[in-house]
Each structure stands twice: as structure tokens, then as C-alpha cells.
Image: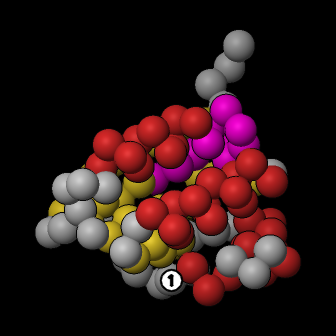
């Protein structure tokens, strides 16, 4: 079975940057929420870099909603056109920011 989701974590000045890649679906959601739960006690801001995300389904959208409820500040950066369209349709486009990448 091929890896469908990857995550790279960088911590910097109270912010956690998570670079996601692959498909943001149910399989990735479990990993992402677990990772976020481990990190949220140490940081106040979460930035998700979606530059390498190729697909998002309802599970991925649900995960973003969950993260939004858990973190004081959540920003999504670098979504591709398809991901940006899903965020707009679902009303989550307010999460999109234009912050530079962490790395």
C-alpha cells in the first residue's frame, strides 16, 4: 500500500508549521488530529501548508473544522486551486492566509 499522506513538522516561536502532502482524507485525518493533539499544549498557533496536498474529501474538511475548534489560531497556506475551491465551497476559506513557509 502506498503512503497517501505525509506530514513534516517545524516549531518556531510559538507556532507549529505542518507541511502536509498527498491526500487529506480519513486515513490522513487520524494522523493529523493525533499529531495536533500532541503539539497543541506547546504552541498557540498552527499553520498548515497544503502546497503538496493533492486531494481533500469530507473527512479532510471535518479535520480542518476540528483543528479550528482546538487551536487559538489556525492558518492554511498554499492550497492548490482545487483545495482552495473546496475550502471556499465549505466556508473555510477564511482560514487561508498568505504567510511565508517556515522552511
**Relative height, residue 12 to residue 92 (above, below):** above
Locate residue 46, reporting x and y percent: 38, 65
Residue 22 makes an appearance in the image: no
Residue for point 24% across, 54% down? 41
| Residue nearest the observer in this picture, 52 or 97 | 97
- Position in image of residue 60 (x %, y %): 70, 52
Q: Residue under label 1, please give it.
A: 97
Residue at the limit of the structure toward the right, as seen here:
89
Range of magenta residues: 19-29
Left or right of 32 in this view: 90: right
Q: Is residue 83 magenta?
A: no
Q: Quadrant of the C terminus?
A: bottom left
Q: Residue at x 45, y 72 (%)?
A: 74
Say which residue appears at 69% left-offset and 67% top-offset: 80
User: Up-down: is 43 above or below 33?
Assistant: below
Q: Residues within 10 Å of mark 1 (few under 14, many from 20)?
A: some
Query: Which of the 4 image quarters holds residue 47?
Result: bottom left
| Label tally | 1
Q: Measuring from the top left, give residue 10's x and y in whole percent.
A: 27, 52
Q: Is residue 35 left or right of residue 62?
A: left
Horizontal relation, residue 42 to residue 84: left or right = left
> Could you say which quadrant of the image residue 15 lies in?
bottom left
Q: Secondary structure at mark 1?
A: loop
For this orientation, the residue located farthest to the top is: 1
Amino acid at each position: 500500500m502506498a503512503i497517501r499522506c505525509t506530514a513534516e513538522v517545524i516549531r518556531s516561536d510559538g507556532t507549529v508549521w505542518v507541511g502536509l502532502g498527498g491526500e487529506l482524507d480519513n486515513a490522513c485525518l487520524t494522523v493529523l488530529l493525533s499529531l495536533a493533539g500532541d503539539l497543541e499544549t506547546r504552541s498557540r498557533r498552527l499553520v498548515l501548508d497544503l502546497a503538496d496536498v493533492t486531494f481533500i474529501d469530507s473527512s479532510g474538511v471535518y479535520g480542518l473544522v476540528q483543528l479550528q475548534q482546538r487551536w487559538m489560531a489556525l492558518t492554511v497556506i498554499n492550497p492548490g486551486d482545487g483545495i482552495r475551491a473546496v475550502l471556499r465551497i465549505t466556508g473555510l476559506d477564511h482560514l487561508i492566509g498568505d504567510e511565508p513557509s517556515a522552511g
